[in-house]
Amino acid sequence: MLLHDPNLWHLNRHTVAGGVALGLFIAFIPMPMQMLVAAAFAIPLRVNLPIAVAMVWVSNPLTMPPMFFFSYRIGTWFIGSPVRDRGFEPSLEWFWYELGNIWQPLYLGSIICGGLVGLAGYGLVHMIWRLHIRSHLRRRRARRRPAE
């Protein structure tokens, strides 16, 4: 069974960094059931499943409007289309009404932002992990040295 893969559950530098990257990427993509999508991708990518699912919660009801608006602005910049900020309301009704007009720059910007934030999270986990290991090795060497 696929869920018995130890990489999905164990904490090591590669699976944790991959789970963080995947979860952050999915968090930026406007779609329903982001946690299920993160779990579905974590299995074949063999990254830490609980961390991938947990990182999706970066996008929550408080953070979604600024995240998606920023992604939309990035998408319009890349496409070169005008920004449709006239009559903007941070509501679900406005979003569904305007989705036909904004979906292309929104999804392009979401993929770009999600990719960049995911890469940053991946690198940050690797950096923090290395710093922690170095610190641990220094402390261990200091304990092994005879007191002078």
Image (spheres, rainbow, N blue to C red):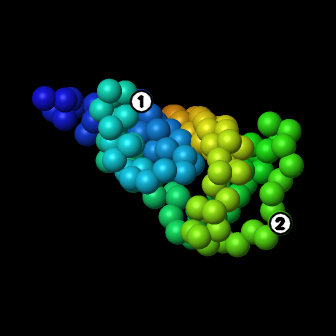
Q: For mark 1, does the 10 Å Cα neighbourhood hold few (<14), some (14 to 19), or many (20 or more) residues?
A: some
Residue at horizontal 86 percent and vertical 49 percent from the top = 82
Residue 117 coordinates in the image, percent (x, y): 62, 43
Q: Nearer the viewer, residue 138 or 114?
A: 114
Residue 127 coordinates in the image, percent (x, y): 56, 37
Residue 18 coordinates in the image, percent (x, y): 44, 34
Q: For mark 2, does the 10 Å Cα neighbourhood hold few (<14), some (14 to 19), or many (20 or more) residues?
A: few
Q: Left of 132 or right of it: where is 120?
A: right
Residue 14: assigned label = 1
Tell me: residue 38, above or below residue 5. Answer: below
Residue at horizontal 83 percent and vertical 66 percent from the top = 86
Residue 44: assigned label = none
Tell me: residue 134, above or below residue 98. Answer: above
Tell me: residue 139, above or below residue 45. Answer: below
Q: Left of 145 or right of it: where is 108?
A: right
Q: Nearer the viewer, residue 32 or 114?
A: 32
- What amino acid type is highlighted by mark number 2? Arg
Q: CA distance from mark 2 to mark 1?
A: 44 Å
Q: Secondary structure at mark 1?
A: helix
Q: Which residue is mark 2?
A: 86
Residue at horizontal 39 percent and vertical 43 percent from the top = 38
Q: Nearer the viewer, residue 29 or 7?
A: 29
